[in-house]
């Protein structure tokens, strides 16, 4: 996979920070990837583009280290953890 440029990352983070519809679509696309690590990375990107890990962890009633571990892609976070994180970001999972 080619390395993404800094300008791509800046554009992505700007869109995630400033465009709630883009953010929602970005998370939905990651959810449909059939790769949980892709979804965790997308959630991590949304957090880093917005309030940051420390604030999101506080809003989700988690400690920062637990949030980093949950979104590392190396393990599957608990369902309750993901619900708390998504709720802290203003999102929820739904079936349609």
Image (spheres, rainbow, N blue to C red):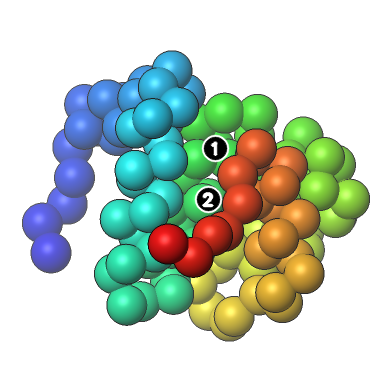
Mark 2 closeness class: few <14, some 14–19, many ≥20 residues within 10 Å: many
Give the left or right position of residue 73, taking residue 85 as reference.
left
Asked whether residue 87 is in view, the answer is yes
Which residue of the protein is positioned furthest toward the front in this rendering? 96
1 with respect to 90 (left or right): left
User: Residue at (65%, 29%) from the top-left corner?
Assistant: 51
**Which image quarter holds the C terminus?**
bottom left
Locate residue 85, reporting x and y percent. Answer: 70, 52
Identified at 35% across, 25% down, the residue is 15
Is residue 49 placed above or below 42 in the rendered structure?
Answer: above
Few, some or many C-alpha atoms within 10 Å of disc 1 (few <14, some 14-19, many ≥20)? some
Q: Position of residue 24 (x, y in %)?
A: 42, 40
What label does residue 20 carry, if any?
A: none
Label 2 secondary element: helix
Which one is nearer the viewer's eye here, 28 or 61? 28
Residue position marked by numbered label 2 in the rendering:
44
Total numbered labels placed on residues in the image: 2
Image location of residue 92, percent across then percent down: 61, 52
Label 2 and label 1: CA atoms lie apart by 6 Å
Q: Is residue 13 visible?
A: no
Q: Nearer the viewer, residue 85 or 25?
A: 25
Q: Secondary structure at mark 1?
A: helix
Residues at discs 2 and 1 in contact (Cβ within 8 Å): yes
Q: Which residue is mark 1?
A: 48
**71 horizontally vs 26: left or right:** right
| Quadrant housing residue 78 | bottom right
């Amino acid at each position: 996979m080619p390395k993404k440029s800094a300008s791509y990352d800046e554009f992505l983070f700007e869109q995630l920070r400033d465009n709630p519809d883009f953010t929602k679509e970005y998370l939905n696309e990651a959810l449909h990837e059939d790769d949980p690590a892709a979804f965790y990375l997308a959630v991590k990107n949304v957090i880093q583009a917005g309030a940051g890990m420390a604030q999101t962890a506080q809003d989700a009633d988690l400690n920062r280290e637990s949030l980093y571990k949950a979104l590392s892609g190396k393990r599957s976070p608990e369902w309750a953890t993901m619900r708390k994180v998504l709720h802290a970001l203003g999102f929820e999972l739904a079936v349609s």
